Image (cartoon, rainbow, N blue to C red):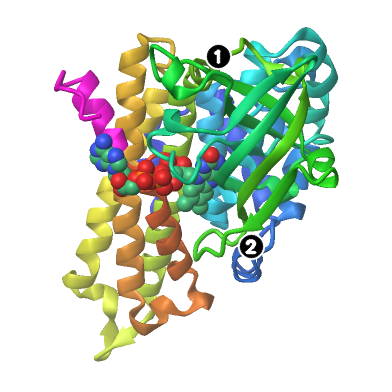
Amino acid sequence: MSGYFASELALSPRQQAVREEIRAVCDEFDDAYWRERDAEGEYPHEFVNALAEEGWLGILLPEEYGGKGYGTEETVAMMYEIARSGAGFSGAQTVHAAIYNSAPLVKYGSDELKENLLPQVASGEAWIQCFSLTEPTAGSESTAMTTRAERDGDEYVVNGEKLWTSRIDVSDYLVLAARTTPYDEVDKKTKGVSLFLVDIERGVDEGSIQLEEIDKTVSGVVSSFRVTYDDLRIPADQLVGVEDEGFYQVLDGLNEERLVIAAEAIGLGELAIEKGADYANEREVFGQPIGQNQAVQHPLAAAFARVQAAKQFTFDAAKRTDEERKAVGARANAAKYLAADATFEAADAAVQVHGGRGVAREYDVERYLREARLTRLVPITQELALNYIGENVLELPRSF
Ligand SMILES: Cc1cc2nc3c(=O)[nH]c(=O)nc-3n(C[C@H](O)[C@H](O)[C@H](O)COP(=O)(O)OP(=O)(O)OC[C@H]3O[C@@H](n4cnc5c(N)ncnc54)[C@H](O)[C@@H]3O)c2cc1C
């Protein structure tokens, strides 16, 4: 595929360097590696370890804790490159949380917590790959969570149920969101939530964290769980930040993370288009390459145009995260929306071009389509991304 559009991105020297270094790591993991991990439902430990060894899980951590001290611009470049390499959206998701879960710790964690834990995160010794927020009755409406953390002396006692808690099987710690003040006792529903750092092994060994894996059809490389917290005792010094203010701590940095998600979707979209175009050049039907037919060319070309537009938009937004918060939020939600839809079209076109082979695992495009579908659902749905724009940019009444 021509590099014409990619060269238009005008990457900074640091973004360019990140891309090249990440590409060198990813080159060790070919399509077959990702295909097999997805089919077997295996976490790609070798891949994540390779990135961790070179310090990439600490891309956002300050240098004083052993991190690289980079920002959103470089992280967008990193995660785009991982997805683009063949790992896809799900491959990117295998490390995404490790990078973002330490963000609230950097900003709100106690000095002791930061000094003890962050260097281990940066070096890949301790993994915080897991954020436990969603509940069976609190997804898009996350403030409706009912999981409770009640203070008891110098501990909190947690009871409740979470859904879709991903990567808890490969993490040392998780970040838990729980209500320290019940929903019906707060004047604003965004208040009363607190964040905790939880030692997973301890909770599992004590029987106060119980896991049940969700049987799902996408992202075999990441396992997701229904988690029951049953009288889980958390030392009070594992509270992250201020009690009852956790929701605001989550919101802080969410826009930047959303831009990175968009970049991961874009990497997947380009991957799908490339596979589709390669196959359209090779496959001959009625004595000519199928790609000679405009009916085959156009869906790929249209998807290419849309993916490139989303890419320009996302990389531009990543340069402007120090602007006014609502403007950053509008761009982040628009980027996520555009990237997910463009990528879905790209993956669907790539499957169609492959004819029957489009659903055979060995051609990879069926995996891309499953993942592209997922980008429309997580970390927030397309509808919720549009709600943000409707309310905050178009100044329309709030729908919820
Ligand atoms: C593979 C996977 C991994 C995940 N990993 C994690 C994880 O690690 N940690 C975690 O905490 N969560 C995780 N999630 C959960 C994810 O964030 C939620 O699924 C997502 O936020 C949507 O919530 P929901 O599934 O409860 O859908 P609901 O909130 O029940 O929504 C259902 C539908 O209604 C629509 N809808 C609802 N309200 C409105 C409205 N006001 N306007 C328009 N449309 C509306 C939604 O857009 C959606 O289409 C994961 C999910 C998946 C699928």
The amino acid beneath tag 2 is: Asp
Q: Which residue is mark 2?
A: 30
Residue 8 location in percent, x, y? 36, 35
Residue occupying image coordinates x 82% and y 11% = 112
Residue occupying image coordinates x 51% and y 33% = 146
Towards the viewer: 287 or 62: 62
Disc on res. 218: none
Q: Which quadrant of the frame does ligand 1 lie within?
A: top left
Residue 16 lies left or right of residue 385; in this view the side is right
Q: Which residues are magenta?
A: 382-400
| Mark 1 → mark 2, Cα distance in angstroms | 45 Å
The amino acid beneath tag 1 is: Asp
Residue 302 location in percent, x, y? 22, 55
Towards the viewer: 306 or 17: 306
Residue 355 location in percent, x, y? 33, 81
Disc on res. 244: 1
Was residue 324 drawn as part of the magenta stretch in this picture? no
In the rendered image, the vertical position of residue 168 relative to residue 324, given as above or below? below
Was residue 389 drawn as part of the magenta stretch in this picture? yes
Towards the viewer: 315 or 356: 356
Residue 352 lies left or right of residue 96; in this view the side is left
Mark 1: which secondary structure?
loop
In the rendered image, the vertical position of residue 247 relative to residue 2, given as above or below? above
Quarter of the image with the C terminus in it: top left
Residue 310 lies left or right of residue 131; in this view the side is left
> In terms of sequence position, does the residue under pointer 1 or pointer 2 come before the other?
2
In the rendered image, the vertical position of residue 90 relative to residue 79, given as above or below? below
Mark 2: which secondary structure?
loop
Label 2: how many Cα within 10 Å (few below 14, some 14–19, many 20+)? few
Label 1: how many Cα within 10 Å (few below 14, some 14–19, many 20+)? many
Instruction: Look at the image and tell me whether residue 289 can be seen.
Output: yes
